Image (cartoon, rainbow, N blue to C red):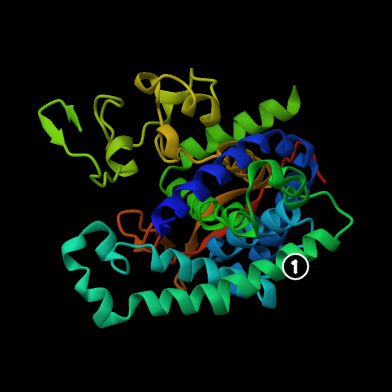
Amino acid sequence: MTNERTRAINIKQTGTALKRLSESVDDLYHILDRETKFGVNLMLKDALEVQDKEGGIDPLAYTRLTAMNIILATVFGIQGSLSVQDPLYKRVLHNLEQNSAFISIGSDISAYFPVLSFLDVIFRKEKKMRDFVENDSKPLYRHLIQLARQSEQPSLVKELDSIKDSLNIDEQNMVTLTRGVDTISLAMAWVFAILCHYPKWQKRMLDEVDLFIQNYIIYKDYLIPKGTLLIGSAHANNNDPHFFSEPEKFKPERYLNDAKSIYASSNGNIQSRELFTFGWGRRICPGIYMAESEMFNCMTRLFQKCTIEPALSSTGETNIPDIDDCIDFGSIVSPVPYKIRLVERNSVVIDE
C-alpha cells in the first residue's frame, strides 16, 4: 500500500473516530470550564501585577497555556501547566510550532508545486521531517498517551481506546487530537487585539455577558483534471462579498440576529454559511464544537471580570495593537507581539 493511500486511510479513520467522540465533549465540559477559569484568573493576576511597570502583558502566552491545558485535561486526563515557564508547556509548544513550520508552503513547497520537488533533495526536507517525527513528536505523544492510560481521570484517549479496534486506528491517529492548541489560542489573541480598536463593541459584549449571567470536473469555466491539488482559502471565503456585504469592515451587527453556533452553521447549507475558518466539506474540522465552547468560556469569564484596554507607554500614551500586520506561522497567522491592560470592573455580577 502506498504512503499516500495509507495517509488517506488514516485521515478518514481519525475523522470517523473524532465524530464518534463528539458527544464526549459534553461529558468533559466541567474540565473545560475549570481550565478556562484558571487561565483567565492567571492572566488577570499577572496583568495586574506587571502592567503598571511594563505597560501590559502578551495575551498569546496565556491563551496558549489555557488551550494546551484543556487538551491535556480532556484528551489525556492529566493536569496541565501552572505557568508559561513549565517545561511541559514549553515542550508541547515547541512541537506544535515546529509542526506548523513543516506544513507551511515555505517548508513543504513541493507539495504545492511538484515541479520544485528537486529542492527537497537540496534542503534535505524529508530527513529533517523524519528526524522531527522520530526524535520530537513520537516521544512526546507516546509519553502523553502513557500518562493518559495511567491516569484515573476520564479522557478522550480512553474513549478512543475503547473504539480503536473497531475502527482499525492506532496511536498515530491520536496525535490529531492535539492540533487545536494554536488555532484556538491565536484566534483568541486576534480577538483581544481587535477589541482594543473597538471599545464600543467590547462594551456590547460585556453587556451581553452580564445579561446572560443575570437572567474531472468542470466547475464554471474551469476544467479541473483528476488528481489536481485544490487548496481552499479560508481568508478569501471569509471575505467574499457574495456572503458578506462590505467584508473589509468590522461590522459585528451582521450577526446580532443570528443565534446559530459556529458548529451549527458549519453543518448547514453552504449557501447559508457565515464562517469558513474551520473549513468545509469532507475536510471540515471535526473539533469545531470544542473549539467554540473553549473560546466562549474563556472570553465570557474574562469579560465578566475586566475590560481589555491598550497597553500604556512610559509617557502614558496608548499603544493600540497593530491588526493590519501579522506573523506567518505557516498554516496559521498570529498577531504581531503586543501588550494589553486588564482593568478590573467595578461592578462584577458574579464574583468567584
Q: Residue at x 64, y 72 (%)?
A: 140
Query: In the image, is 313 to the left or to the right of 93?
Result: left
Q: Residue at x 43, y 42 (%)?
A: 198
Does any portion of residue 320 appear in the rendered image?
A: no
Q: Position of residue 101 (x, y in %)?
A: 40, 68
- Please, what secondary structure does the residue beneath circle 1 have? loop
Nearer the observer, 45 or 153: 153
Quadrant in the rendering for residue 120: bottom left
Quadrant in the rendering for residue 323: bottom left
219 over 340 or under it: above or below: above
Q: Position of residue 111 (x, y in %)?
A: 28, 60
Does any portion of residue 115 appear in the rendered image?
A: yes
Query: In the image, is 11 to the left or to the right of 249?
Result: right
334 over 288 or under it: above or below: below
Quadrant in the rendering for residue 126: bottom left
Residue type, label 1: Leu
Give the residue at the far right of this rendering: 152
Give the residue at the far front of this rendering: 1
Q: Which residue is mark 1?
A: 82
Q: Position of residue 186 (x, y in %)?
A: 49, 55
Q: Position of residue 317 (x, y in %)?
A: 42, 64
Q: Residue at x 74, y 41 (%)?
A: 348
Query: In the image, is 301 to the left or to the right of 3?
Result: right
Nearer the observer, 291 or 257: 291
Nearer the observer, 339 or 281: 281
265 over 189 or under it: above or below: above
